């Protein structure tokens, strides 16, 4: 996955250590967290993920890995991010709140946290924020980079999911809905349609629908592959179709991918090599030795990695550190 991993893609990285996705729990009605969790459990099935409430949970899990001698090369944090730079978490004693950059910086100073970071984070490790806004808040980005003593990558805009669904003709007794698409024939516009929940629903619908379904799976496969969500199935076409049928069934017909957008700009994923890197900012950490000596945290100043040489606008993405990141593209 070397080429795909250079700028984005959710497939595991190469090199020493493991990849971990931490998902901050949220109420069931929280659409963002629910969709992201669905994406992780279905499209990224097989990758290590852990649902957590707060930093104590995260570092408890990492500490256990460190005791086992396991190194971590990439962390992804799925959480809400505020324009102020806060990250939504639930403290062990309290209700959900916005965890501010100064609180992240304070956590980074704890001796047990520094020791865990020293043990578990692999050289060159990267932490990606799968939430919103933090790329616009230098204090926040720098605080998180310093917390994990790793490059921190955060979006300047909004992270959300988009999806692939396959419509099939409604069967007798099914409600269905009318659909009007440019590519449809007049006859197709007259019938009702439902979103298929499993590949088994397609088998009895005739060769034309089956062929459309295979084209749908193939299109989704190549988009997910280009975005780095999945590894290539190189053997043959039937193997690819079988893999995608299993993914379709696992996702109950709702195959998700994540995208980033900013302002009026359309949502893009890592398959867009031009626009995708421009939506992310990299923050480099201060060294753990400097933190141990008590040197000032850089949380109060804009990080050099996000500045131009004259201190003005952000550098073009090509000049930013080569930070692996995440996300997906619409069909």
Image: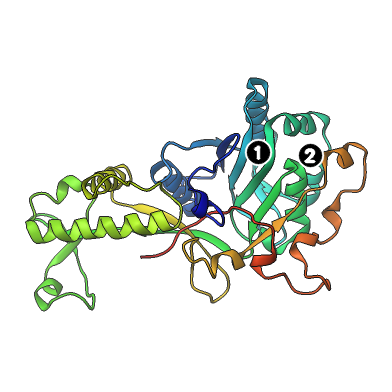
Front in this rendered view, residue 204 or 150: 150
Q: Quadrant of the C terminus?
A: bottom left
Q: How is the image coloured?
A: rainbow
Residue nearest the viewer, comparing 139 with 5: 5
| 52 sits left or right of 222 in the view | right
Q: Is residue 223 above or below residue 49?
A: below
Q: Residues within 10 Å of mark 2 (few under 14, many from 20)?
A: some
Report if residue 169 is visible in the image.
no
The residue under label 2 is 107
Residue 15 horizontal/vertical position (percent): 58, 38
In what element is the residue under mark 2? helix
**Residue 75 in view (yes/no):** yes
Q: What residue do we see at 72% from left, 69% from top? A: 315
- Residue with the most extreme top position: 68
Q: Would residue 224 appear left or right of 246 to someone viewing this image?
A: right
Q: Nearer the viewer, residue 307 or 123?
A: 123
Relative to 322, residue 115 above or below: above
In space, the residues marked 2 and 1 are separated at their CA atoms by 11 Å
Residue topped by disc 1:
54
Pointer 1 local density, CA inside 10 Å: few below 14, some 14–19, many at least 20:
many
């Amino acid at each position: 996955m070397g080429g795909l991993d250079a700028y984005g893609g959710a497939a595991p990285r190469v090199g020493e250590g493991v990849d971990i996705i931490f998902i901050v729990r949220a109420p069931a009605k929280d659409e963002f967290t629910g969709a992201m969790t669905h994406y992780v459990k279905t499209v990224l099935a097989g990758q290590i993920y852990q649902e957590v409430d707060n930093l104590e949970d995260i570092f408890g899990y990492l500490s256990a890995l460190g005791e086992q001698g396991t190194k971590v090369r990439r962390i992804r944090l799925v959480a809400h991010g505020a324009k102020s730079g806060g990250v939504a978490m639930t403290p062990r004693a309290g209700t959900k709140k916005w965890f501010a950059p100064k609180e992240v910086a304070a956590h980074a100073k704890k001796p047990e946290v520094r020791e865990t970071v020293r043990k578990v984070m692999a050289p060159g490790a990267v932490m990606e924020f799968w939430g919103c806004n933090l790329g616009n808040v230098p204090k926040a980005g720098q605080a998180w980079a310093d917390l994990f003593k790793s490059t921190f990558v955060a979006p300047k805009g909004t992270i959300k999911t988009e999806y692939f669904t396959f419509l099939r003709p409604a069967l007798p007794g099914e409600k269905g809905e009318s659909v009007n698409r440019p590519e449809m024939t007049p006859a197709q516009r007259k019938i009702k349609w439902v979103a298929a929940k499993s590949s088994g629903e397609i088998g009895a619908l005739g060769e034309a629908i089956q062929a459309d379904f295979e084209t749908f799976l193939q299109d989704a496969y190549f988009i997910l592959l280009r975005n780095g969500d999945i590894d290539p199935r190189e053997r043959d076409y039937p193997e690819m179709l079988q893999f995608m049928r299993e993914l379709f069934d696992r996702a109950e017909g709702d195959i998700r991918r994540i995208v980033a957008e900013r302002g009026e700009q359309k949502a893009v994923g890592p398959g867009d090599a031009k626009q995708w890197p421009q939506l992310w900012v990299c923050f480099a950490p201060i060294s753990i030795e400097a933190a141990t000596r008590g040197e000032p945290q850089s949380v109060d100043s804009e990080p050099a990695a996000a500045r131009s040489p004259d201190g003005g606008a952000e550098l073009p993405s090509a000049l930013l550190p080569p930070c692996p990141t995440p996300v997906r593209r619409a069909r």
